Amino acid sequence: MTLILSCLTRDYVLQVSDRRLVFGYPNGTWKLAEDDRNKAVVVNRTLIFAYTGWANIAGQETNLWFAEVIKPFVDSDRLHEGTLEVARRATEYFVRQRYRPEPKLHTFIGVGWQRRRMDGVIVPIAVRITNAFDDQCRPLVRARRDFVVHKAGLQRLTGIKVLANGYPVEQARLVRLERRLRRSYYLRAPLHSARVLAKELRSISDDLGHDGTVGKNLIVTCLPKVAVLSWSDAVLGPPDGRSLSTFYVPAEGNRQIRKSSTLVQKGFPILLSDIEFDIPPPADGSDPYAGWR
C-alpha cells in the first residue's frame, strides 16, 4: 500500500507519493520491504504517473516496466494507445498470478495536460489505469479481472481538484485539503501547494503509526503548463512554477537528496532514477526541508 495525492489546477499539476514498499501475505499481514523506492514516471513532459499496488511486474521494478511498455507509443505520438497497451499487458500478467483478488489491486494514476483537438487549448487531465475501480470510478475491495483506462479531461476546472489513490482517505479530509489548497492556487504558488500536500501525506502517515503502510519519505513531482508549452530543463528541486521538477523529502534529517523521476521522452532513451546526488547539510545548520514536514 502507498498513498498518492495528486493536485490539478489550470496552471500546474502536482503529485506527491510516499516511497514505502511492503510485502503482503495471503493472511492479510505484511512487512516493510523498503522506504525509498521511486514510484514516479514522467511521460513526454505531458503526464506524471505514479503507482500503488505491486512493486514489481514481470520481474522488473514497476516504474521501469511501465516506462518500457509505453515508450514505443510515446515515440510514435500514440500516447492514448500506450495507456491501453499498459492495461492489456497488466491484465495478462495479473491473470497469471495465483493470488486472491484482494491483494491484486493495482493502479497507475497520471495527471498532466492534453491539447484539445477542437481548438488546440491545453487542459488538465487525469488518467487512471487500474483493476481497483469499477466502471463508475468507485473503489473496489476485490480486483477486477481486466485493467481499464479511466480518462477525465478537466477543461471546466476553475480551481483545485485533489485525487487520492492507494490508502483510502476519507472524503471529508479531502474536502478540507482542497480548501487549504485554494489559497495556493489563487497565489499561483505550486511550491505552497506542494508543501500542503506533503504535510497532509505525512500527517496521514502519523495517524497510521510508525509501522503503517504509508511512509514519510516523499517524492514530489510538479509539471506546470508553461513547461509543456516551452522546453525547459528539468529541475531537481522544489517546484519553481516554470519547469518540470522532482523533489525528494526525507522522513527526517537535513541531508539533501537530488534524484530524478523516471523520464520517458520521445526520441530519447529512458532516463532511470538510479542516479542520486547526495548534498551535505547546510553549513549554517538550517533545515532545507523547513515547511515540508
Image (cartoon, rainbow, N blue to C red):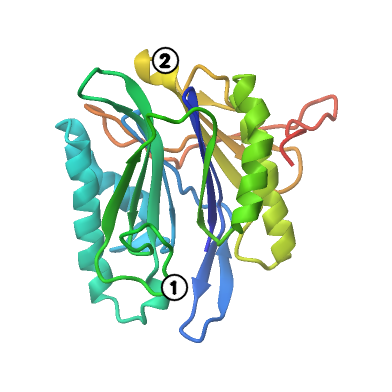
Residue, disc 2: 232
In-image side of 61 versus 80 (left or right): right
Find numbered disc 2 in the image and state the secondary structure of the residue it sits on.
loop
Q: How many marks?
A: 2
What amino acid type is highlighted by mark number 1? Val
Camera-nearest residue between 262 and 89: 89
Mark toward the start of the polypeptide (1 vs 2): 1
Residue at the far top: name it. 230
Residue found at x 20% / y 50%: 84
Q: Is residue 267 visible?
A: yes
Quadrant containing the C terminus is top right
Residue 3 position within the rendered picture, expressed as x and y whole percent measured from the top left: 55, 55
For badge 2, the amino acid type reads Ser
Position of residue 179 measured from the top left corner of the image (x, y, whole percent): 66, 38
| 22 sits to left or right of 81 | right
| Nearer the observer, 111 or 219 | 111
The residue positioned 69% from the left and 36% from the top of the image is: 180
Position in image of residue 231 (x %, y %)? 37, 14
